[in-house]
Amino acid sequence: MSFTCHTKNKKERLFWYKIFQFDTDLSLEKCKFHFFGIRISFKWHKFIKILLSSPLPLKWRWWIKGKLDKYEIYPMWQYEIRYHKFDLNEISELFEIYKLFPKNIMNSDDTLDFIIKNKISVARVGDGEIVNEIVGKRCYFPELKERLIKILMNGSNSKCLVCTNAFFPADQNIKLFLRKVAAFYWTKVISLETFKTLKFAKSGMYGDAYCFLNYFKENDSSDLAEKKKKYIRQIWEKRKVLFVVNKNSPVMNDKSEFCDVEQKAFVFGPAGGAFAEYDRIMQEIKQYDTDWLIYIEMGPCATILAYELSKLGYQALDMGDYYSRIILSDFNNINNNVI
């Protein structure tokens, strides 16, 4: 195996190598996946993955993805990450990205504290936005791409905390699977050369786009995890909350997380490609007074909505898939369960 060491610090290189050599007792080729209740092989699941990235019309691909989600088909990438062993070249590239990575990104705990204490809006330019919209080869909404680049480049302001991915693969307090996701993301999806094209603000601070996820640590007890969830609920307790979601969002069936809000209202958007209806969604939101908290789950469109709504005096939160990842998942067993 060829290896080009980008750092002369052998001790540091060995430290990183030790962190990312995760052993496994399960071969990826032996994994079985569920498709409409039928167990299928790795190769068939790989075919489904290719189909989802094919030139099929956007609506068709969203229909296929919806079916996969409905029948709880475990995405192949989660198995790829869990059983991936990082070689020395990948570790070396990861180290180079780490050296170039912006140092003005708050950790997850500080990000949440800042949101709660300042009642500030949150616009997330995370891995999904970067991979699919900013550096992705297919661009369905050029305006969306341009606005995301501008938000990332300008960074936070007094009304909106812009969040991006913090660099946490080496943080052993973060859950193992999530650290592997981050390491896989930067080396296999983004790469060093692509990372160099991203523009970040040199002054000011960014929040952690994974703050709600990384707030739950590797060794949290059930009681501590519940206390952390309660801390997060301070954001919307006793407030009027406008949910901007699709009609099939699990938020619609919530009976616990938002039971203490003063009032609920909903604005609905499509499950995919929401930016196509950006103007309509924005106009419906603006029918509500600025004392309403705006809770948004609308993919990359949520980033733009939150950022623009903050200018109008709203506190708007781009929540990503917070509800499904935290409220509906068992975060105490995250390393043993697919998220």
Image (cartoon, rainbow, N blue to C red):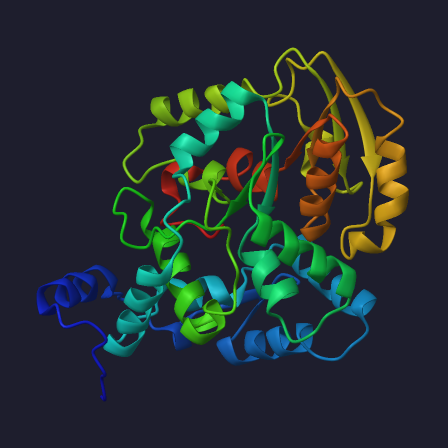
- Locate residue 332, reporting x and y percent: 37, 37
Which residue is pictured at 75% across the width and 80% down the height? Answer: 55
Q: Nearer the viewer, residue 153 or 165?
A: 153
Residue 22's place in the image compared with 270, above or below, is: below
* Residue 167 seen from this side: yes
- Count all numbered tags in the image, as a single digit: 0
- Locate residue 115, reporting x and y percent: 52, 27
Residue 7's place in the image compared with 291, above or below, is: below
Residue 143's place in the image compared with 212, above or below, is: below
Which residue is pictured at 59% across the width and 49% down the height? Answer: 154
Indicate the quadrant containing the N terminus: top left, top right, bottom left or bottom right. bottom left
Q: Quadrant of residue 186?
A: bottom left
Q: Nearer the viewer, residue 303 or 161?
A: 161
* Residue 86 seen from this side: no
- Locate residue 171, reporting x and y percent: 28, 48
Which residue is pictured at 48% across the width and 27% down the height? Answer: 114
**Residue that lies at the very extreme toward the left in this rendered image:** 11
Q: Nearer the viewer, residue 142 or 30?
A: 142
Which residue is pictured at 20% across the width and 62% down the height? Answer: 16
Residue 147's place in the image compared with 87, above or below, is: above
- Locate residue 242, reporting x and y percent: 76, 26
**Residue that lies at the very extreme toward the bottom in this rendered image:** 2
